[in-house]
């Protein structure tokens, strides 16, 4: 964020506003952590603020301070629409274009509010009036920490804010191991611990609350894994039937895609998850090294994300999607070298 934008933000936030904060659809730890962290900061500053999530989010995030006040657009549509139309400021966090909020998109497009984007994805859209977009950032949570610092209020980061922001930094960096993790990321995490983030408890609540059925589903996913040594690629499929058979709940498949990359010599890992209700196959891509899954997802699977972590979807069957994916790999053989 440049100085001019920071000054403009300070001016806007110096008077009472009606604020709506929006994460992307299927919000993850970073999306919920950043929106809740910002929410607590704004509330403590005396602002009226509400988080509206496009849909529900996983149970392993439903302990975060303030989560009970999040409005679910899918469930509470009328109330959410009213809040959006009355908002004077709309913050959009952890996504780069309005397509990422799906069914909420037309209502944000109609809204009269001033838009402020805070996000670390590539190719940001131009809908926001004030933009803090930086692809080098580990997480939107790290950016919310910076944002509060830009406004001169680092001393106002309390333990609620610290717990929320630490959560998203931890999940989006794969527990501080991805390339985007810098010494500053660690310094910020350390400062958040000083300010009350309970790091051990956060790790425990996010990663160590498995159900037996989730582990059974993981077993099924690992059994289904196909390894294409020639392309240094591993992919997993999960059909609706397999999900149902293992009592699938939102968030259960989080992290499954990463198992492919733990294989020696594999630099591209993918998971295809059938979603009969939406009539799509949801796809997650992960890579190690230079292969850009962001470009790959954008070009072939209506998606995007980051260089080493991206998502997308397909409108054909699970089998056809996987076959189409495999058919593409020969064009990338040179780039897919571990
Ligand atoms: P995940 O695979 O964990 O759902 O997402 C990995 C990254 O890709 C995240 O940064 C996420 O925001 C982004 N992403 C996931 N799905 C999509 C999609 O359908 N479109 C775009 N543009 N980005 C996505
Ligand atoms: Mn993120």
Image (cartoon, grey):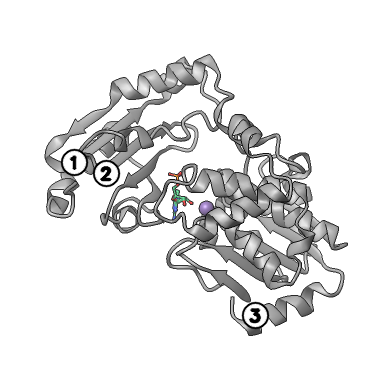
Query: Which quadrant would residue 268 be assigned to in this image?
Result: top left
- The number of discs equals 3
For the residue pair 316 and 132, the one nearer the viewer reads as: 132
Query: Which quadrant would residue 84 be assigned to in this image?
Result: bottom right
Q: Secondary structure at mark 3?
A: helix
Q: Where 321 sits versus 181, above or below?
A: above
Horizontal and vertical percent position of residue 174? 46, 43
Task: Tell which circle, 1 or 2, labels the residue nearer the N-terminal end.
Answer: 1
Locate residue 204 relative to residue 87 in the image: left or right: left
Q: Secondary structure at mark 1?
A: loop
Crowding near pointer 2: few (<14 within 10 Å), some, many (20+)?
many
Is label 1 within 8 A of ligand 1 (CB to nearest ligand atom)? no
Query: Which quadrant would residue 27 be assigned to in this image?
Result: top right
Query: Mark number for residue 337?
Result: none
Residue at 34%, 45% in the rendered image: 286
Residue marked by disc 1: 232
Residue at 57%, 52% in the rendered image: 24
Horizontal and vertical percent position of residue 81? 74, 54
- Disc 1 to disc 2, C-alpha distance: 6 Å
Query: Mark number for residue 268?
Result: 2
Check whether the beta carbons of the residues at disc 1 and disc 2 lie within 8 A of each other. yes
Task: Tell which circle, 1 or 3, labels the residue nearer the N-terminal end.
Answer: 3
Can residue 8 be seen here? The reply is yes
Locate residue 298 relative to residue 246 in the image: left or right: left
Query: Mark number for residue 5?
Result: 3
Crowding near pointer 1: few (<14 within 10 Å), some, many (20+)?
many
Q: Where 216 sits versus 173, above or below?
A: above
Horizontal and vertical percent position of residue 44? 84, 58
- Disc 1 to disc 3, C-alpha distance: 44 Å
Can residue 82 be seen here? The reply is no
Q: Where 238 sits versus 114, above or below?
A: above
């Amino acid at each position: 964020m440049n100085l001019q934008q920071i000054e403009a933000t300070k001016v806007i936030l110096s008077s009472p506003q009606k604020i709506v904060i929006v994460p992307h659809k299927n919000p993850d730890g970073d999306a919920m952590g950043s929106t809740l962290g910002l929410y607590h900061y704004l509330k403590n500053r005396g602002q009226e603020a509400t988080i509206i999530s496009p849909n529900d989010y996983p149970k392993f995030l439903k302990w975060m301070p303030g989560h009970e006040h999040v409005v679910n657009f899918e469930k509470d549509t009328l109330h959410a629409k009213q809040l959006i139309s009355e908002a004077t400021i709309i913050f959009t966090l952890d996504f780069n274009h309005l397509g990422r909020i799906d069914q909420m998109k037309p209502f944000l497009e109609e809204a009269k509010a001033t838009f402020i984007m805070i996000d670390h994805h590539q190719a940001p859209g131009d809908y926001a009036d004030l933009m803090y977009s930086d692809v080098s950032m580990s997480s939107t949570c790290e950016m919310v920490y910076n944002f509060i610092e830009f406004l001169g209020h680092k001393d106002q980061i309390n333990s609620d804010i610290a717990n929320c922001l630490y959560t998203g930094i931890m999940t989006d960096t794969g527990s501080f191991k991805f390339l985007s993790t810098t010494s500053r990321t660690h310094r910020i995490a350390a400062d958040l611990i000083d300010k009350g983030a309970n790091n051990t408890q956060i790790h425990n609540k996010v990663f160590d609350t498995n159900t037996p059925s989730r582990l059974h589903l993981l077993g099924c996913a690992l059994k289904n894994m196909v390894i294409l040594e020639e392309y240094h690629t591993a992919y997993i499929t999960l059909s609706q039937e397999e999900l149902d058979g293992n009592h699938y709940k939102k968030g259960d498949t989080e992290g499954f895609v990463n198992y492919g990359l733990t294989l020696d010599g594999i630099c591209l890992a993918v998971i295809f998850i059938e979603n009969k209700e939406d009539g799509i196959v949801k796809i997650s891509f992960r890579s190690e090294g230079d292969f850009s899954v962001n470009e790959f997802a954008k070009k072939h699977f209506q998606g995007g994300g980051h260089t080493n972590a991206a998502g997308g979807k397909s409108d054909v069957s699970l089998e056809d999607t996987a076959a189409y994916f495999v058919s593409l790999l020969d064009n990338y053989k040179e780039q897919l070298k571990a």
